[in-house]
Image (tube, rainbow, N blue to C red):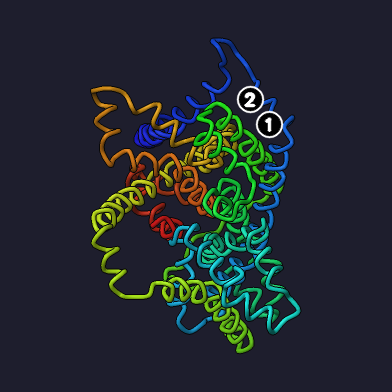
Amino acid sequence: MQKTLTLGLFFAIFLCTTFLPIMWMFGNSIFEDGAFSFFYYKSIFLAQEYVKAITNSLILASVTTALSAFLGVSVGFFLARANLPFQNVFKICFLIPFIIPSYITGIAWTNLLGKAGFLNKALSKYTFLSSGSVSDFIYSIYGASFILSITFFPVIMLLTEYALKNINPRLEESSLISGNTFLTLKKITLPLIAPAILSGVMIVFVLSLSEFGVPSFLQVNVLTTQIFTQFSAFYNEKAATALAFPLIAITMMIIMLERVYLQGKSFEILGRTTSNSTISYNLTWLRRTGLVFCTLVLLVFVVNPLSTLILNTKTLSAYYDAFLLARNGITNSIVFGSIGATFLTFMGFFLGYLSEKIRSGQKQSMAAFIWLFFAVPATVSGIGLIKLWNRPGGFFQGIYSSLWIIIIGYVVKFSPLSSRIMANYLKQMPHSMEETGIVMGASWFRVLRKILFPLQKHGLSPHG
């Protein structure tokens, strides 16, 4: 009963906060003059500009995902296994591009690689590249992919690192006795963390598909910029909503491919040892390689753009003035961000449990249903929230006129992502661990507190 009521409560919250406003928008988009009409959906595949936008969106997401996967898996592996010095310093610094709005990161890199940029001048002087070709690159779809990969690779880095730390060391120790590190990595380690890497790849792909800031700044024609144009320039919310449909369709195809890949495979890991130890490959060459690689990533992708932003701010007084102007916003961001992150952690856990651990034939359908809403651009879901909550008087108006609508916005945008991350870590835990607690007479809440939450602490950590 405790399990049923708890899971039912959080799923009901998901339906009310995420499902209803988005379905409101899609339902409204298929009505024209009081009758069913798929006019806007047909135009997506008939108009050349929309076909081009879909193609560009796929290129943007694919290139971004490939670059992010290379950086994220590599850095995550070195942080978890290479026994690097200053590991926590590296990790915190690598998270900076993800914390900073991607739009700001885009400004930094255009300052560096634009025609007047320092790196542009250096590359054109010391390499065969011309100033124009470097500038054209950063203002292209591939330049947008480059910037977004820097922004999103920490997602894959965290998932890879925590998946490696979640592996029971005994599973790898037996193979490492033979002394073949590469064979252990290929046959044991990588297969065990495959769901984490795959989840990270899917998250980055969908984040790239629904990204608006960087493509808009670089004037790249993708679906999200077309959606925003329909809203802001033409006030055509039906056409804008219809343009979000290809994003959902692409996400659905990715989910189906993932299901085919994971079908029949088991990724269950027998939790952690009592010492909470992890395997480290104490190899000098690996430590040196990891240190050089992580240092290069830090200097090129973090220090470099941050330096140009700081140097472009001529005086320290500018920071003080900005703080005075934005202090209320900073306070609200910290307070409501903390509330939102805390709530999303719990909501993500229970939605992830619902989509991964329930004994039902509908488990995979539930996971796909929750994940699909992550592909909906924030512009569409935001307008849906306005349509649903902006009503005169009463409870709805009280919420809409307060900052609590921001919390609901966080839930709409990030609850599918949060549930996806938690489902990935729950996939690594056998059903028998929970069942043992139930057989011993413990309530489900006690099983949560004593077994599930402790075992999933590495899954809960990324949500903060």
| 168 to 399, vertically: above or below | below
Element under label 1? helix
Element under label 2? helix
Instruction: Classify mark 1: residues with Cα within 10 Å, few (<14), some (14-19) or many (20+).
Output: many
Q: Which residue has dot 2 on it?
A: 40
Asked if residue 164 shows in the view, the reply is no
Along the viewing direction, whichever of 361 and 393 lies nearer the viewer: 393
Numbered mark located on residue 128 in the image: none
| 290 to 71, vertically: above or below | below
- Please say if the residues under marks 1 and 2 sit with CB atoms less than 8 Å apart: yes
Q: Which residue has dot 1 on it?
A: 44
Q: Position of residue 67 (x, y in %)?
A: 65, 63
Q: Position of residue 204 (x, y in %)?
A: 58, 54
Q: Amino acid at mark 2?
A: Tyr
Q: Amino acid at mark 1?
A: Ile
Instruction: Classify mark 2: residues with Cα within 10 Å, few (<14), some (14-19) or many (20+).
Output: some
Q: Position of residue 287 (x, y in %)?
A: 58, 85
Image-quadrant location for residue 131: bottom right
> Residue placed at 58% from the left, 43% from the top?
225
Q: Quadrant of the N terminus?
A: top left
